[in-house]
Amino acid sequence: MLRKFALLLTCTIMLAAFTANNSFAQVKKAAPAKAAAAKKPAAKKVVARPMAIKAVRVKIVTDSGTLIVRLYDSTPLHRDNFAKLVKENFFDSLLFHRVIPEFMIQGGDPTSKNAPSGTMLGNGGGDMQRIPAEFRTSLIHKKGVLAAARDNNPERASSACQFYLVEGKKWTDAELDGIEGSIGKKYTPQQRMLYKTIGGTPFLDMNYTVFGEVESGIEVIHKIATVPRDGNNRPLGDVRMHIELIK
């Protein structure tokens, strides 16, 4: 259900390489006649190369501080959908409506904008088209990542608008061994080190799509995760957001 994270177009650029065959005239050895002039090499055809896709970054301004988040190019469906909503000012004045220390902060419910205090949130956006899952073994739920919430649909497709930022906690090797068995994924030594040193929520890997990470302002996640909250984990004081694209 959306509250519970309540929430492949892979761009392959093919560059055509070509080889121009250079043709030269033979110099005749007969007679005292002057040698035939060598032909100039055929002019090489100029191939226009596609421009590299610039990294997409967003600025999330909250009541507790500002975060800069880079969206992953390896999850283009989620990247493009999120960027589109940001351009449309969809997220402006929405709330972080579910916050849990050592876990995550969740927002993006469109019904949260004018929701009275104490109203349980998390079901908004269900009428929007889901985004197909884009699971990548290289992308894990380390502290500071941006991921998509979802309901319990069997395809594990993401909510079009609800997202969360991971705070998480640190894990031991023994704990990670158990999680590997439950999610069917083997962590690399580097991924294990990240979970052991900075922390995260590894039990969500390969179940919810990770599509970005915080580049600055990661401390804001903890500030929001630890604000006073009610029994539904909604902050007692509204924590609003404003999101914009940046270069």
Image: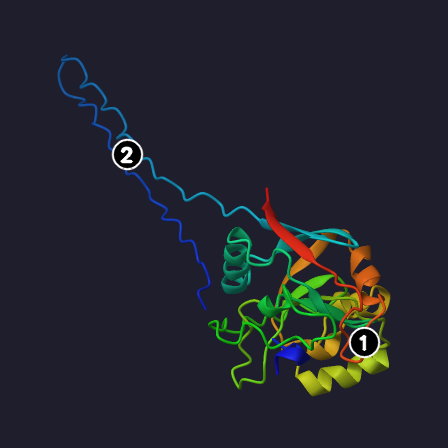
Picture quarter with the N terminus = bottom right
Crowding at dot 2, Cα within 10 Å, few <14 / some 14-19 / many 20+, comes out as few
Q: Nearer the viewer, residue 128 or 81?
A: 128
Q: Splitting the image into 4 quarters, where does residue 193 fall?
A: bottom right
Q: Is residue 31 above or below residue 8?
A: above
Residue 103, image x, y percentages: 78, 73
Lateral position of residue 79 relative to residue 137, left or right:
left
Lateral position of residue 169 relative to residue 145, left or right:
right
Lateral position of residue 117 relative to residue 72, left or right:
right
Residue 183, image x, y percentages: 67, 83
Give the image's coloring scheme.
rainbow
Residue position marked by numbered label 1 in the rendering: 230
Q: Nearer the viewer, residue 107 or 169?
A: 107
The residue that appears at 52% across and 58% down in the rendered structure is 85
Q: Is residue 49 above or below residue 26?
A: below
* Amino acid identity at mark 2: Asn
Mark 2 to mark 1: distance in Å? Answer: 77 Å
Circle 1 SS class: loop
The residue that appears at 70% across and 63% down in the rendered structure is 145
Q: Residue furthest front?
A: 116
Q: Is residue 154 above or below residue 125?
A: below
Label 2 vs 1, first from the N-terminus: 2
Crowding at dot 1, Cα within 10 Å, few <14 / some 14-19 / many 20+, comes out as few
Circle 2 SS class: loop
Picture quarter with the C terminus = top right
